[in-house]
Amino acid sequence: MKHTYVYDHYYKYAEITEVLQKYAADYPELTELASIGQTPEGRQQWMLKVTNKATGTFEEKPALYVEGNLHAGEVTGSMTVMYLLDTILSNTDDEQMKYLLDHYTVYAVPRVSPDGSEYYLTTPDTVRSAPRLYPFSHAMPGLQRQDLDGDGVIRLMRVKTPYGAWKVSEKDPRVMTRRQPDDLFGEFYNVYDEGLLEDYDGINIEAAPAPFGNDFNRNYPIGWQTEDQQKGSGDYPLSNPETKANADFLLAHPNVCAVVDMHTAGGQNLFTPGYKSAKQAIKQDIDLYRAMCKIAQQENGYPILNVYDDYMPQSAPQTCGGFDDFCHFALGIPAMTIECWDLAERSGLHPVYPPREDKSDEEKEDELCAMIKWVDENISPEHYMKWTEFDHPQLGKVELGGCDAKFVSQNPPTPYLEQEVAKHTRFMLRMIKMLPSLAIDTLKTTQLGEDVFKVEAIVGNIGYMPTYVFKEGLKSKRLKGVSLEMSGLEVLQGTVKADLGHLEGHGGLRASGWGISQSTGQAAPLRKKAEWVVRGKKGDAFEILCDSGKAGKTSIKGIL
Ligand SMILES: [Zn+2]
């Protein structure tokens, strides 16, 4: 696949804006640049809509919604969305891409939180979602992260003290390992983030709460909890303009059939529910997730995990107010979360899920040694900084060391960026083909009298997903079924607009036999028929309009 842009760095807001504006200018027949909202710092939450407008509007086709940077620092997410757009728009001569553009819509929001990502990319600091004080309105006492030596990276800071909980590893002097229960003699340290102390009492060093404590992925209405139960959840559901913007967009666009939310890190294909067990969700919906995740896994190699049952640690099993749960339970559409980049796996470690909380100090020491070895061999031996003396204005002699975790563990180092985003793009381009897709496959007219005709039309769903997509969605009063409407002729018998209910997809077909038998059984129809008795003369033109909330609109013209 060809690409127009380079993926050897992370794009700041200005570059994302420039590239999206260029797409809109270069491909007016395929794209439209919109903003789903403006942030408190005045940036746009850009959305590029993509489809072949010649075959129908954006809203008339089943759509995939893709976004990045609901978590600001997980900038691999926005780069994946940019790479997806580049892949589509740089390969419009490819037959499969043409088909996708003719039949589907992609709504792509590279950066839900542009204020947060800009802060992340232009300062040494990290931020979960947005650089806005929350829940405290002022800086709290304690150690505040800061780049003290001016090298552009906030690393670790160790302070030698007889009260220390850490000691130097014998396996690698850069690694700190836990002081053992009977370790009384020797050199011990406490290890902190590089930073300065607010209201230092000269005795104790404690980390201050993160000043920018919002977590946008806990700010949605499903399973939402107050701050004391769920850190970062916000003052109330959708209290952040950024989260309200994507929720409003999705509510207003029922043609969105599926959502992919791009995050980092760890290398997982995650599916909801996150606030309760998958066993409490509808099995058919979970089966659909597994089919989606299977394709994702074929491309990215990552494990398939349910957020609640498999992914979250035992001590904190729930995610409350997650965006993906909002899509699943409020909108009735599947929402997958991909956690990009797997430093542990690349270091030869094989993470188990849910994460083990009983790892011994020695296991943790070995894991850290393995990851630093990967950094030495694959970035440079200098990248993981050796402990280096530094005169701290408050603490006296300390030592600074460690790596730039933002672009080693949270996001891939830039030489690994393109291969990471390419595999998720391949998945999304395959996943689009699962969406329900309607076609009127049969149109038949029969003359009954001099000016009376019977018209029959059969509509079918050639997609894998049913036209309702998710069983959870059937609970929604907003979900429309498939209708066929006669236009251009007087209807004498039959409803002008025939409501046909829903059509299954080929994903609903099950093998009816065992072993060598490969015959399929069908639980519900993939095709349905409508018929009208109409008044007209031979040669009169008419049109059958097909409408479905999720699978879009189509039409066919006929002549009596
Ligand atoms: Zn995240």
Image (tube, helix red, strand yellow):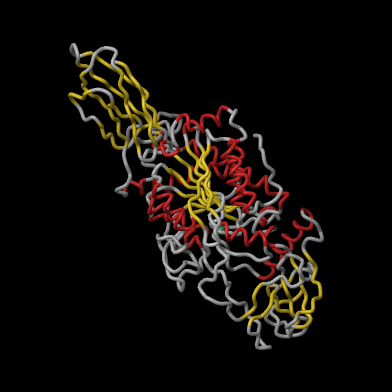
Q: Percent position (x, y) of residue 216?
A: 50, 61
For image coordinates 20% across by 27% down, the residue present is 494
- Relative to 359, 545 lies left or right: left
Which quadrant holds the N terminus? Answer: top right
Which quadrant holds the C terminus? Answer: top left
- Relative to 545, 215 lies left or right: right
Q: Quadrant of ligand 1?
A: bottom right
- Relative to 378, 208 lies left or right: left
Q: Nearer the viewer, residue 284 or 392?
A: 392
Q: Nearer the viewer, residue 47 or 273?
A: 47
For image coordinates 57% across by 56% down, the residue present is 114
For image coordinates 47% across by 35% down, the residue present is 104
412 up-or-down from 62: above or below: below
Q: Percent position (x, y) of residue 115?
A: 57, 60
184 up-or-down from 451: above or below: below
Count of numbered marks: 0
Q: Percent position (x, y) of residue 344?
A: 66, 57
Q: Percent position (x, y) of residue 241?
A: 47, 60
- Relative to 379, 119 lies left or right: left
Q: Nearer the viewer, residue 59 or 39?
A: 39
